[in-house]
Image (tube, helix red, strand yellow):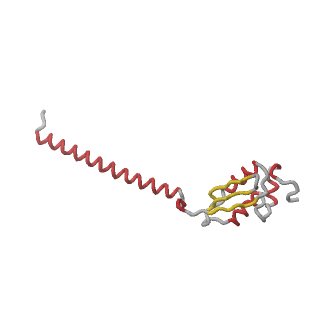
Amino acid sequence: MRQSMAEEFMLDYVTVLNNQDLKKTKMIFMKTLKIIFLSLFLFVSGGNLFAQTDTVRIHTSSLCDMCKKTIERDLSFEKGVKTINLDIDSKLVTVVYLPSKTNPEKIRVALTKIGYDADSLKADAKAFDKLPDCCKAPGHHE
């Protein structure tokens, strides 16, 4: 049975409309997806995408590569600390941090709680005792 000309035209017209609706739906979906990903990115970055950072250099009692590993690992858990780099030769730890979250004094105290001197602050005795032997300076805390 053959469709009439009018029925064929209507079928073609509906197909064209459906294709246009499909294109509009795809465009709306893609725009929505972009907005969702952008929102997710900003949420994950914690709003700190454009936050100002500051840098502090602290003289430590570090001695070896184990000290470097311990200090860089443990300080990375401090709130507001972005990057840590310990130069073993100069015994200077350079910390980049967010001033809105922490300050140099808090970072120095955190270093002492790990078991190392931080500028004029002495290492916590209990934390120092837990350090590996290679990280303990002779005559320190006796």
Question: Which residue does the image show at 34% across and 52% down from the upper left?
Answer: 28
**Which quadrant is the C terminus positioned in?**
bottom right
Residue 79 picture quarter: bottom right
Residue reaching furthest to the top: 1
**Which quadrant is the N terminus positioned in?**
top left
**Front-most of residues 95 and 78:** 95
Residue 60 as seen in the image, left or right of residue 78: right
Q: Where is residue 29 in the image (x, y as percent from the top left)?
A: 36, 51
The correct choice, above or below, for 2 with respect to 121 in the image is above
Q: Position of residue 63 (x, y in %)?
A: 79, 52
Q: Where is residue 115 in the image (x, y as percent from the top left)?
A: 78, 57
Q: Position of residue 122 (x, y in %)?
A: 80, 63
Residue 103 as seen in the image, left or right of residue 18: right
Count the marks. 0
**Front-most of residues 138 and 33:** 138
Question: Which residue does the image show at 83% across and 53% down from the upper left?
Answer: 136
Residue 124 picture quarter: bottom right
Residue 5 as seen in the image, left or right of residue 29: left
Residue reaching furthest to the front: 90
Question: Which residue does the image show at 31% across and 50% down from the upper left?
Answer: 25
**Front-most of residues 120 and 40:** 120
